[in-house]
Amino acid sequence: RVLVLLITPTHAFNAPWTVWRHIARLPRRGAEVACLFTRAAIPWKNRQIPGIAGTGPLCMTAIAAGRGYRPLPPISIDMPSNWTAVHPGIPQDRAIPIVIRGMHRARAFFGDTVTGTSRWITANTVWDLLFGLLLLPITAGYLAIGRMLLAKIFFTDTRCNRCGICVEECPEKAIVMPETPDRPVFWTWRCESCMRCMNTCPQRAVQVSTPWVTGLIILMMWLTGSSGIFALIRQIPDAWIIRSWLGHPPLSWAITVLVSWGVIVGGYRLFYRFSRWRWFRSLLTATAHTRWFRQYLAPKQPPGH
């Protein structure tokens, strides 16, 4: 018996692009496969708010089945949220209970999977699937546009000493440290916004620019709204059939994605060029909300667990 375990974090209520590519490249074979997703839980008083893995577990299971694997019931397990671009890091004493519960669930899942007693329909599966379907537009938006935006929200403030730890720790090798000293760290499109760079930097120099993100989103919304690119399309004479084509899906969706891509690519080039100036980086640092956040440090395995 050959059993393949696919373990991945949740991103945008599904799997990261890296995992999609990995599963799509799996060699075709008649092994069994089980998927385990970790999802972002938030402590609340003496309990915790569960995360949402969304459609990810069933999507990945279906893709693996399409590659010739025999699917086994998936599971999603809560772990402390590390999305410190949005919220402060969870303190160690509040993160450890979440980790302990997750470890117990993981052991039970592995045992049930090996013995063949795992179940397809559980409260956990229904929770993920229900909210995953409701949040499907967010997942689709992330896959089309959001991933590119999240890959370009980071910058290093004036505390960066070019130690290179962020480059070494990045699981996607998406961070570039230019040889020229006056050029700051550069995030490439391979970035999955996993926050590892932000949460391992000893200088706490990796930040998210609040005005940059806000301004970029407003610009994209205006350009792809009724007063932006589609206002220009309405200027095309009614007699031209191309006007009706461009105004209806899926062409209108494609236009929205292409315009958003252009804004992100062009905007980041300007953003990166300006961030070479120390005064500009000081301004970015002063207006970054993340400078007030506690970094997330993954708790070590509790004794006896």
Image (cartoon, helix red, strand yellow):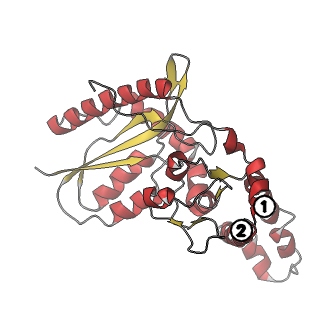
Q: Disc 1 marks which amino acid?
A: Phe
Tell me the residue at 31%/37% (across/down). Answer: 120
Tell me the residue that label 2 is attached to.
276
Q: Quadrant of residue 177?
A: bottom right
Q: Disc 2 marks which amino acid?
A: Arg
Q: Residues within 10 Å of mark 2 (few under 14, many from 20)?
A: some
Q: Nearer the viewer, residue 260 or 69?
A: 260
**Image-based side of 233 in relation to 53, left or right:** right
Tell me the residue at 50%/57% (across/down). Answer: 166
Tell me the residue at 35%/53% (across/down). Answer: 62
The quarter in which the C terminus is drawn is: top left
**Image-based side of 302 in relation to 115, left or right:** right
Pointers 2 and 1 in contact (CB under 8 A)?
yes
Tell me the residue that label 1 is attached to.
280
User: For the view shown, which residue lies furthest in the top direction?
Assistant: 46
**Image-based side of 93 in relation to 139, left or right:** left
Q: Position of residue 253 (x, y in %)?
A: 67, 66
- Determine the secondary structure under disc 2: loop
Q: Nearer the viewer, residue 38 or 209?
A: 209
